[in-house]
Image (cartoon, rainbow, N blue to C red):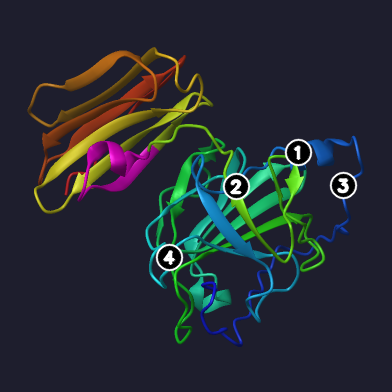
């Protein structure tokens, strides 16, 4: 819930995780589980400061956190949300009518660890997609189930195992346990500070993406106001150091446009008019390459 806003009663954040049951407990010091837990970072871009609150919502079961940073009710709407740790997206869907989460992204980090990012305004990853720590997965929003009037915020959870709600764990950011019930935290999630929409510009929305191993990701965006596509490749390794990176866009019937060189953060933007035409797009970072088929023909 938005800090300082009226509580929303009756929002049952209950998500079935299967029939298996794993008892939740604090990770044993020095164990693999504890080492993984200490790798989590704040789910926001580098150096941003957000205030988290675990007790400002009647719907919270345990150690969930609602995050805001703006001074007005809608100040955070559309702000970038990033992966707290690397993993695989196992849910990217609107689940409002089911459990009140609205647009939800769930990431499996291995070892029984998962993170939840709820009420998103937009989701920029898809189920089955591998994501790197610090990679954008969506934007802050206020989506929920019909009738729930909530102000924009990020609802964040860390879970270990499947015995809900006992599996909800205390959040750890940069190796430090969150200061429950409320704390302001500055993000050390300092991967690539740029986003696809920032690179391509105002009016562009991500319509497709592909991971480049752990080296980065290539994004295809579209601007419905002018019919232009845009492609950019964002690095997730060697960020800040100039290394070979490529982005390209080929509109059906036209010559391929490519931006290739040694870049510190990203290649692109590569922009071309493609309204009503199919495109090929792709890119390269490190040793990983993605080449799309001829697609997105609308």
Residue at mark 1: 36
Sequence-first disc among 2 and 1: 1
Q: Residue at x 53, y 44 (%)?
A: 128
Q: Residue 285: image x %, image y %?
A: 42, 20
For the record, the magenta segment spans 195-209
Q: Residue 21: image x %, image y %?
A: 84, 61
Residue 16 position (above or below residue 197): below
Residue at mark 4: 141
Residue at mark 3: 27
| Other residues around mark 2 within 10 Å, as few (<14) / some (14–19) / many (≥20) | many
Sequence-first disc among 2 and 3: 3
Q: Residue 143: image x %, image y %?
A: 44, 71
Question: 171 or 116: nearer the eye?
Answer: 171
Sequence-first disc among 3 and 4: 3
Circles 3, 1 touching at the beta carbon (< 8 Å): yes
| Other residues around mark 1 within 10 Å, as few (<14) / some (14–19) / many (≥20) | some
Residue 260 position (above or below residue 202): above
């Amino acid at each position: 819930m938005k800090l300082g806003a009226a509580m929303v009663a009756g929002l049952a954040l209950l998500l079935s995780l299967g029939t298996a049951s794993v008892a939740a407990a604090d990770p044993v010091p020095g164990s693999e589980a504890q080492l993984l837990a200490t790798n989590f970072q704040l789910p926001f871009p580098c150096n941003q400061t957000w205030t988290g609150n675990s007790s400002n919502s009647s719907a919270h079961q345990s150690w969930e956190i609602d995050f805001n940073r703006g001074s007005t009710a809608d100040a955070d709407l559309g702000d970038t949300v990033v992966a707290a740790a690397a993993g695989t997206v196992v849910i990217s869907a609107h689940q409002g009518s089911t459990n009140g989460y609205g647009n939800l992204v769930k990431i499996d980090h291995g070892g029984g660890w998962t993170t939840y990012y709820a009420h998103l305004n937009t989701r920029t990853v898809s189920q089955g997609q591998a994501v790197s720590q610090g990679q954008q997965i969506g934007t802050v929003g206020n989506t929920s189930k019909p009738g729930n009037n909530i102000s924009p915020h990020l609802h964040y959870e860390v879970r270990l195992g499947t015995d809900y709600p006992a599996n909800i764990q205390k959040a750890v950011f940069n190796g430090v346990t969150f200061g429950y019930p409320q704390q302001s935290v500055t993000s050390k999630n300092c991967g690539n500070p740029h986003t696809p929409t920032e690179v391509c510009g105002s009016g562009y929305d991500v319509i497709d993406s592909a991971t480049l191993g752990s080296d980065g990701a290539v994004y295809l965006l579209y601007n419905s106001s002018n019919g232009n596509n845009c492609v950019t490749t964002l690095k997730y390794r060697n960020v800040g150091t100039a290394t070979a990176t490529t982005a390209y866009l080929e509109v059906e019937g036209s010559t391929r446009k490519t931006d290739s060189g040694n870049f510190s953060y990203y290649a692109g933007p590569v922009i071309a008019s493609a309204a009503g035409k199919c495109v090929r797009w792709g890119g390269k970072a490190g040793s990983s390459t993605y080449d799309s088929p001829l697609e997105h023909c609308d």
